[in-house]
Amino acid sequence: MGFGDASAKDKKAAAAKAKDEAAKAAAEDASWQDTDKGVQKKAQRAADAAAKADAKLAAKAELKELERQEEEATSQMKGANKKASGYPKVTQAEIARRQALMGAVAKANPKKQSKKTEVVSQPKLEANTNRQEDVVDASGIDAALSALDVGEKKQVKMTYAEFEARELDGIRQENPGLKMSQAKVGDLRGKR
């Protein structure tokens, strides 16, 4: 035997000791584990939720990448709409100018005219009559008559004191012997 060599007996003892230590460590780890079924289910649900969230984020990132690629591809196409926000507002003057240009092009090149470049006349625009006061728009006879104010003057709003003064004069003329309190009560009873 050479110097520093361990004997077979020593090697066996070291292997057995290592095996015992590994078994003790495994037993201690097992003793620390939670064996409660509720806790295990809760941990499983949390792991499932985390996996689901990761999958959702991955799908979202993939969708963004596909959208970016599609946008890149469409922006390189001929005649593609470079402005992604939609069409700008077009004025009546701009529409008339475009129609005049299209008409001039159509007259200059009658052979090249296709369905895409065919000039279509714009439908007739009607004026907005919502704010005009001289136009009567009512449904039904009563509404039309009240809108026209045929033969009637509009009633003016009045306060109670004005109403009372007007009615008291009429009651006093009909019944000159009544006291003021009686006339007021008669005024109220007569108008109910």
Image (cartoon, rainbow, N blue to C red):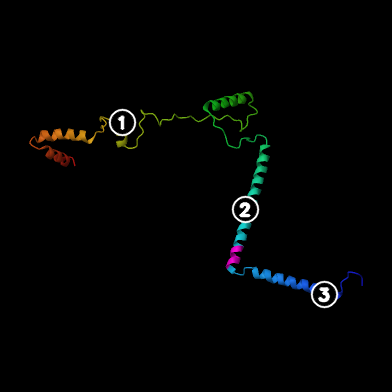
Circle 1 SS class? helix
Which residue does the numbered mark 2 point to in the structure image? Answer: 56
Residues shaded magenta:
38-43
- Amino acid tagged 1: Leu
> At which x and y percent is residue 173?
11, 33
Residue 42, picture quadrant: bottom right
Which residue does the numbered mark 3 point to in the structure image? Answer: 12
For the residues marked 3 and 2, what is the alpha-carbon distance in whole angstroms? Answer: 54 Å
> At which x and y percent is residue 120?
55, 30
Do the residues under discs 2 and 1 have CB atoms within 8 angstroms?
A: no
How packed mark 2 is, by other alpha carbons closer than 10 Å (few <14, some 14-19, many 20 or more), is few
**Which dot, 3 or 2, sits closer to the camera?**
3
Q: Which of marks 3 and 2 is nearer the N terminus?
A: 3
Q: Nearer the viewer, residue 76 or 150?
A: 76
Q: Nearer the viewer, residue 178 or 150?
A: 178
For the residues marked 3 and 1, what is the alpha-carbon distance in whole angstroms? Answer: 118 Å
Q: Nearer the viewer, residue 30 or 89?
A: 30
- Amino acid tagged 2: Lys
Q: Which residue is drawn at 61% across and 55% down?
A: 53
Name above or below for residue 147 compared with residue 34.
above
Q: Which residue is drawn at 61% across and 63% down?
A: 43
Of the 4 image quadrants, the one containing the N terminus is bottom right
Which residue does the numbered mark 1 point to in the structure image? Answer: 148
- Amino acid tagged 3: Lys
**Which dot, 2 or 1, sits closer to the camera?**
2
68 left or right of 21 in image: left
Circle 2 SS class? helix
How packed mark 1 is, by other alpha carbons closer than 10 Å (few <14, some 14-19, many 20 or more), is some
